Every structure is written in C-alpha cells, then in structure tokens.
Image (cartoon, rainbow, N blue to C red):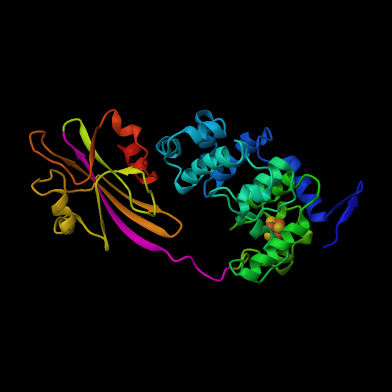
Amino acid sequence: MEKEDISGVNIHPIAIRLLSWYSEYKRDLPWRNNNDSYQIWISEVILQQTRIDQGIGYYLRFLERFPNVASLASASEEEVLKVWQGLGYYSRARNLHQAARQIITHHNGILPSSYHGLISLKGVGAYTAAAVASIAFGLPHAVLDGNVFRVLTRLFAIETAIDSPIGRKMISEIAQSLLPEEDPGSYNQAIMDFGALICTPLQPRCNACVLQESCMAYAKGDVTIYPIKERKTKISNRYFHYFHILQGNRTYLQKRNQPGIWRNLYEFPMIETMQPADFMQLKQTDAFKELFPEVTTLSFEPKLVLRHQLTHQHIHTRFYQVEIPERVTFTPPSALFVTQSEELHNYPVSRLMHKYLETI
Ligand code: SF4
C-alpha cells in the first residue's frame, strides 16, 4: 500500500486522517495521561470484554489497591479476585496476578519492553502484547481487535471471513501496512476509538466519517454486512439454582473448585439442572435431597430470576431464599458458614452473585 512522505516519514493517507481525527476526538481516559507500562497493561486487560464506562471505575480501584507489579504479585489471589468482583471473565484477574509473579521472578520486577517478552506472560495474547508494546514502548505492532477488524473489512470491503486463518492473516497484513513508523501507539488507539465511536457495528456514522471517500463498503452501499464471519458462536444454556440460606445471622458459601467459569470464587450452595426446573421439580432431584435432607423450606418462589450472558453460555438463574430455624442442625455439604451482615461481603463472588447481593 502506498504511503505519503511527510517530513521524511512515510505515512499512509488513511493513517493521516485517522490520527488527525483522533487528535480532535480522542476519548479522555485515565490511562492516556501517562506512559506507565504497568498502568497501560492493566487498562488493556480490564477493557477486554468490558465497556469503557464500567472499566474506568475498576481500573482506578485496581490501581489504588495494586499500584505496581510488586503489590499485585504479593497479594493473594483471593484479594485480586475481590477487587475484580463484578467485572466478569475472572481468568483475566487470575492471569494478571500470575503474570505479575512471573515478572518478579523472571524479569527483575519490570514489565518486559519487547513484544516477545510481553507475549510470554501469562494471559497476554497478541492483542495485549501489541497494545502495550506500541502504546507504552512505541514499538511497531498493529493491534487487532473487534473494532479494527470492522473498520478494515469495511474500508477494503473484505469478503473473506475474519474467523478463517486466511482472513485473519489478510487483515493482520493490512493493519501492519497502515501502521505509521512514528507513534504507532497513537495510531492503534485512533483506529480502535474510531471503530468504537464512528464505524460502529449496527449504525456506523458514515456521514461524519473522515474515511468515507476511501471506504469500499460505503461505495458499494452495504457497510453493515462487514465483517463477514464463517461460524456462528454456539451458545449453550445452563440452569443454576442458588440457595441463599439464612439461619439467624448466618449464611452459607461454597468455593467453586471445578475448572471453567468462576473457579475459586464463592457462591451460595447451588444445584445445576440440565433443563429449566421450577421449585417442585427441583425438590425431586437427588441434589436437592442431599442439600436439604430434613429441612422444610419456607419460601417456594425464587427471590430473583436472572439470565446471565457469557460469550458461549446463557446462564438461567434462580435465587431462592431459604430460612432455617436456628435450633435445626444443618450443614450443607462442603460449605462454610459466614455471618450474613459482615463476612459475606469479604469473599470474592461471581458477577451473577454480585448482582443478587446488590439487589437484596
Ligand atoms: S464510511 Fe462508514 S463504513 Fe466506511 S469507514 Fe466510514 S463509518 Fe465505517
């Protein structure tokens, strides 16, 4: 692709227009105020699968509690999960924590300043390595995220599916060819902001777009068919029934040990069913009889019904509140009891549990 020569620096016309748009419209975000690589890394991880308005609060709280690699590495995983609570995709927090320990052990406590050093860290993939390398260290690595895929497939009307190896390679090459040598970090942020604010998924603002005359999808008159995908994400449905058990000022929590979502987080005792189940159906299950061998519940209606959406799963959830008289001997399997008013809030819980606790 041809680049213009401005003051001795080769730069593609699309990059010029994106950078000029960015200098005027870039979002004022706290991690853009300095070049601290640790802060940029944390912001990039928090913003994956998180809206910016929600991410800012978490970013500020995370940095207040863990201001540098050393403080993050020396914390317990439970402390890190607690600060992350409510943000979802908890593997990001676990990976950040393990990566901080890796940095202490293998990199003298300093975040690596090369792409290869960054990508060797736990949980750091191509996107995060390119973002941190370019923004914090000025290295020429183009980022590829959903925004970039959308902008580039529309600009060049790319018909190849972006979830095919060939499509991904093609877009990666185009992204790299547009990247200016000078200040690649600003360019990367510019194209991502542009995708988030102008070239949006459903109603792109083509009339306000500084790239309109170069946009092949616009010229064809059909922008929203891009990006093209081969596979639809397969969604599975799961049915969770939680029991918020109250016995005086006590309630019960279990630690989720099994691999998969929410590992090492705490939750109320729960039963998962293969199909939707109301309370009467639930009562017939072996899991229910094991959990409540002799107890008559006082409430049959769920206190809260929620549908929680993850990338590949829809979790249909019912929270029941069950009151058990103090005189009754009751010990749910592998549960720990905590005081409802104080201790309950010290444990890291999933976003779903967090929503319930906020509601009550
Ligand atoms: S003209 Fe529309 S589709 Fe093309 S880059 Fe601009 S906003 Fe996106």
**Front residue of this view, candidates 38 and 246:** 38
x 42%, y 41%: residue: 86
Q: Does the magenta stretch include residue 232?
A: yes
Residue 323 sits above or below residue 167 on the image: above
Quadrant of the image containing the N terminus? bottom right
Ligand 1 image-quadrant field: bottom right
x 62%, y 34%: residue: 30
Q: In this view, does 8 lie to the left or right of 227?
A: right
Query: Where, by quadrant of the figure, is residue 350 drawn?
Result: top left
Query: Where, by quadrant of the figure, is residue 31 drawn?
Result: top right
Provide residue 108's location: percent of width, then percent of height.
61, 36
Q: Is residue 238 left or right of residue 44?
A: left
Provide residue 126's location: percent of width, then percent of height.
62, 54
- Residue 145 seen anywhere in this rendered image of the structure: yes
x 70%, y 51%: residue: 191
Residue 357 sits above or below residue 170 on the image: above
Span highlighted in magenta in the image: 229-247
Query: Where, by quadrant of the figure, is residue 150 drawn?
Result: bottom right
Provide residue 241's location: percent of width, then percent of height.
26, 52
Quadrant of the image containing the C terminus? top left
Provide residue 5's location: percent of width, then percent of height.
90, 52
**Front residue of this view, candidates 127 and 264:** 264
Residue 209 sits above or below residue 275 on the image: above
- Residue 130 seen anywhere in this rendered image of the structure: no
Q: Is residue 278 magenta?
A: no
